[in-house]
Image: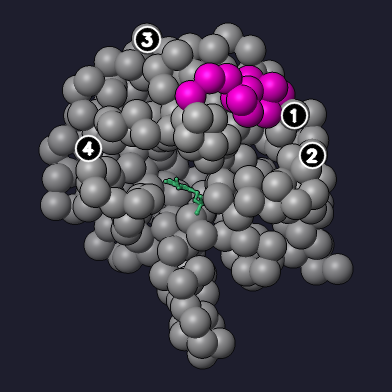
Amino acid sequence: MTRNVRLGVNIDHVATLRNARGGMDPNILQMALAVEEAGADGVTIHLREDRRHIRDADVDLLITHLRTPMNLEIAATDTMIEIAARVRPHAVCLVPEHRLEVTTEGGLDVAGQSDRITACTNALKALGIRVSLFIDPNPAQIDAAAATGAPVIELHTGEYANASHRDERAIQLMTLTEAVGRAKRLGLEVHAGHGLTKFNVKPVAAIAGIEELNIGHSLVARALMVGLPVAVGEFKQLIREAVTGC
Ligand code: PXP
């Protein structure tokens, strides 16, 4: 049977564009529904502490209307866990957050704050929310993630995406492949994301064991050229080709 790799579309940058002028355009709900209709398997949003793109009202609106699972990315803080407890998304992905970063830089240091991450994981699991930890493809972080009891990790693909030379990209791909193997042996479900584009997504999608990819910036950027439904369809097709090998 062909492996299915789900595509979660991160629509944060629809909100970035809307916020540039205030008002409602582009309409986040309309865009989310278009993403779903185009075949995305889920919608991902990151409610940052500084609310620079997605806002609380967006989360409330989307949770009411989405037909696919919502994956809510949040920092591991008490305030964010309270919001997740109120919203009850299908999934929460715990991510690191630094106020001055342009986007999520590097994975969560689970090994360095295992008590806090375990407490957040337990609180979310008790609510029936699937917890995933966004970590670098690093053995110590994978082991620490498994020890928290979180059922899922999302591997940060930024180093792979940023590799400018073919040899460096191959090394980063090997690191990701080994990380997936280690995580699977520990019983974790494995997702991946960050910096994935039309041009680099296939080798990651082809790694056996990866079950979901979360893609935002390059897909929304591509949508400016071809429209959101086409952009989602293109990424779905690339992932399908990577999985089936043709
Ligand atoms: N996964 C996580 C956990 C993220 O924080 C992000 C960026 O917000 C993504 C995936 C998507 O990254 P990109 O926007 O580079 O596709």
Around disc 4, counting alpha carbons within 10 Å, would you say few (fewer than 14), some (14 to 19), or many (20 or more)? many
Give the residue number, with chain letter if any, for mark 4.
117
For marks 4 and 2, give the CA distance. 36 Å
Q: Nearer the viewer, mark 4 or mark 1?
A: 1
Residue at coordinates 69% horizontally, 62% vertically from top-left?
198
Give the residue number, with chain letter if any, for mark 3.
86
Q: Is residue 241 left or right of 119 when viewed as pictured?
A: right
Q: Are marks 4 and 3 in contact (CB under 8 Å)?
A: no
For marks 4 and 3, give the CA distance. 19 Å
Q: Are marks 4 and 2 in contact (CB under 8 Å)?
A: no
Residue 92 visible here: no
For marks 1 and 2, give the CA distance. 6 Å
Q: Is residue 41 above or below residue 162?
A: above
Around disc 3, counting alpha carbons within 10 Å, would you say few (fewer than 14), some (14 to 19), or many (20 or more)? few
Looking at the image, the residue that sits furthest to the bottom is 167
Around disc 1, counting alpha carbons within 10 Å, would you say few (fewer than 14), some (14 to 19), or many (20 or more)? some
Which corner quadrant of the image does residue 137 belong to? bottom left
For marks 4 and 1, give the CA distance. 34 Å
N-terminal of the pair, mark 4 or mark 1, is: 1
Q: Find the magenta span and give its range.
A: 22-33
Tell me where residue 229 appears, x and y as whole percent. Answer: 79, 39
Q: Is residue 238 magenta?
A: no
Give the residue number, with chain letter if any, for mark 1.
34
